[in-house]
Amino acid sequence: MSILNLEIATWRKSSYSTSGGECVEIADDALGVIPVRDSKNPTGPHLVFGDGAWASFISALKND
């Protein structure tokens, strides 16, 4: 098992984030997982989704 170093991850803000500060960032350069964080608190807690779980989540959002 490898350690995921989120300090060196390349983060990008969601294109759906608002200018009001409700921003989500993802790091899509991690192999096999998608880390997610709140851009207002980049050193705070992160969620890490497996590729399949992330794909299901995005699919559900698009179909809702």
Image: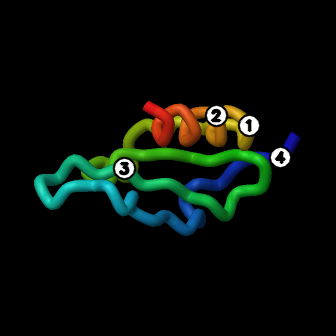
The image quadrant of residue 7 is bottom right
Q: Earlier in the sequence, mark 2 or mark 4?
A: 4
Q: What residue sits 67% from the left and 33% below the top?
A: 53
Give the image location of residue 56, x and y in percent: 64, 34
Label 1 or label 3, whichever lies nearer to me, is 1
Say which residue label 1 marks. 52
Q: Residue furthest right?
A: 1
Which amino acid type corresponds to the residue marked 1 in the rendered image? Gly
Q: Secondary structure at mark 3?
A: strand
| Relative to 53, 26 lies left or right | left
Per the model, the C-alpha gap separating discs 4 and 3 is 25 Å
Q: What residue sits 55% from the left and 68% below the top?
A: 10
Per the model, the C-alpha gap separating discs 3 and 2 is 18 Å
The residue nearer to you, when weighing 24 against 64, is: 64
Say which residue label 3 marks. 24
| Relative to 62, 16 lies left or right | left
Which amino acid type corresponds to the residue marked 4 in the rendered image? Ser
Local packing at callout 1 (Cα closer than 10 Å; few below 14, some 14-19, many 20+) is few
Say which residue label 4 marks. 2
Which amino acid type corresponds to the residue marked 3 in the rendered image? Val
Label 2 or label 4, whichever lies nearer to me, is 2
Q: Secondary structure at mark 2?
A: helix
Per the model, the C-alpha gap separating discs 1 and 4 is 19 Å
Say which residue label 2 marks. 56
